[in-house]
Image (cartoon, rainbow, N blue to C red):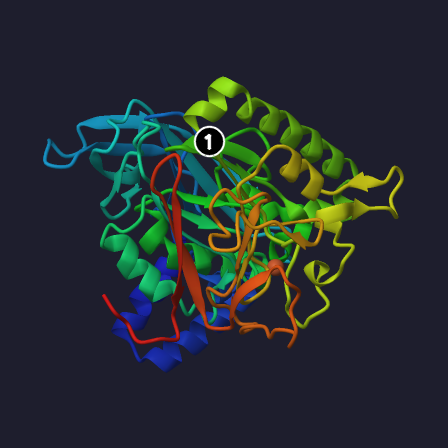
Amino acid sequence: MIWSCFCLLLCAHRDIQAAVRMLSAACLLLGFAPFLVHGVPPIWTQPEQVHLSYAGVPGSMVVTWTTFNKTESTVEYGLLGGRMFKLIAKGSSALFVDSGKEKRKMFIHRVTLIGLKPAATHVYHCGSDEGWSDVFSFTALNDSSSFSPRFALYGDLGNENPQSLSRLQKDTQMGMYDVILHIGDFAYDMHEDNARIGDEFMRQIQSIAAYVPYMTCPGNHESAYNFSNYRSRFSMPGQTESLWYSWDLGSAHIISFSTEVYFYLEFGLELIFKQYEWLKKDLEEANRPENRAVRPWIITMGHRPMYCSDDDQDDCTKFHSFVRLGRNDTKPPAPGLEDLFYRYGVDLELWAHEHTYERLWPVYGDKVYNGSADQPYVNPKAPVHIITGSAGCRERTDRFQPNPKAWSAFRSTDYGYSRMHIINASHIYLEQVSDDQVSRY
Ligand SMILES: [Fe+2]
């Protein structure tokens, strides 16, 4: 430190080139070359990558952010229109060391706000006395089962070519959504460039994720180092480091799970069984008459679909999809999820991974089970599947097979994302936004 200050002072008062030459020689002689090469490391106490998630308990919200030096974890908040930062909540930070060559370190801060007034807009910032974030706001989720939440949902959004992001930013900041669901595949990929791609992606989505809960599930692009970037950066409900969990909103019970347990057996074959048992238990609970009466909709989200009509060789293009029918090549054989979801009356299954949009007719066992010929989605006799993985990433969009099976109802290769409105206990509205079409606000 002393030598660095000395260098600066001297350079300011003499001929610069001569001074640098003289000092370099002196420092080399004295063995201080590293000081001239590296300089003083910057201080990284400023919060960044701020994002929200719902803790699954009425009146709660989790604020998550990153600093590169260790600081305290504080959120100051209050009701919009009231005294700014009237309330204070404290949390903690966890050191995350990326497994890349540089072993970059960062601190992931988490603070859970509780006792929020449902449907009221709250203003907050996060950080510590060593640096505060910008001011953001969110509306606390309404915990009533008659609440009609509005969602944006998509998968496969990257740091490069995030085509839908600006439209999502505008939508979100106009207050169009209560929640965003990101159905796997982030950043492409979060671990790349020693996790700098993850940092930049989390900065990109701050413009939406700091305003509404950003609920996630893992995709194949998160697999590096056993999904460590995904598990460390997000804060979903439950105790599985965001891998599988469920929560309630309005008249829906929403289940998020990992399709990746079927594909990365090196991280533990037992995860398939663990998750399956958890799903079974969760579905049993959701189907108890008193629970299903209050929340009749059961909605799942997982990254890799059971069905699709894309022209790649992905799991969903095969009749024996691992996610759908399980794996027979493991010991013991691993159960798939189609029977389980059908048996417990799942209504809607949200997927991504294919960089397209595809809506299916109600389907089970590769067969169509429409409600009726005129109204296929009224009282359908099997779950409805939506694949929405074209938000935008460096891999561009995928293509379709020319002749899809009977369960394929509508297909689009446009970039875009989906909107879902759970209107009430009997109606859900879904629409697909094409980001390749002209803006119509
Ligand atoms: Fe994927």
In the image, residue 24 sits, relative to residue 80, either above or below, namely below
Residue at the image point whose x is 72% and y is 59% from the top:
315
In the image, residue 193 sits, relative to residue 121, either above or below, namely below
Q: Where is residue 176 in the image (x, y as percent from the top left)?
A: 27, 51
Residue 331 lies in what quarter of the image? top right
Q: Position of residue 289 (x, y in %)?
A: 52, 20
Placement of the C terminus among the 4 image quadrants:
bottom left
- SS assignment at label 1: loop
Is residue 300 at all visible to an observer of this figure?
yes
Q: In this view, does 40 lie to the left or right of 33?
A: left
Q: Is residue 182 left or right of residue 354?
A: left
Asked whether 354 or 404 is in front, the reply is: 404
Say whether mark 1 is within 8 Å of ligand 1: no
Residue 305 lies in what quarter of the image? bottom right
Residue count near mark 1 (Cα–Cα under 10 Å), binned few <14, some 14–19, many ≥20: many
Asked whether 365 or 286 is in front, the reply is: 365
Asked whether 155 or 72 is in front, the reply is: 155
In the image, residue 174 sits, relative to residue 330, either above or below, namely below
Furthest-top residue in this view: 290
Q: Position of residue 379 (x, y in %)?
A: 50, 42
In the image, residue 270 sits, relative to residue 388, either above or below, namely above
Residue at the image point whose x is 53% and y is 55% from the top:
373
Q: Is residue 299 left or right of residue 422?
A: right
Residue denoted by label 1: 296
Is residue 48 at all visible to an observer of this figure?
no
- The residue type indicated by label 1 comes to Pro
Asked whether 225 or 378 is in front, the reply is: 378
Q: Position of residue 380 (x, y in %)?
A: 53, 45
Q: In this view, does 345 lie to the left or right of 21?
A: right
Total labels drawn = 1
Residue at the image point whose x is 64% and y is 63% from the top:
406
Where's ligand 1: which quadrant? bottom right
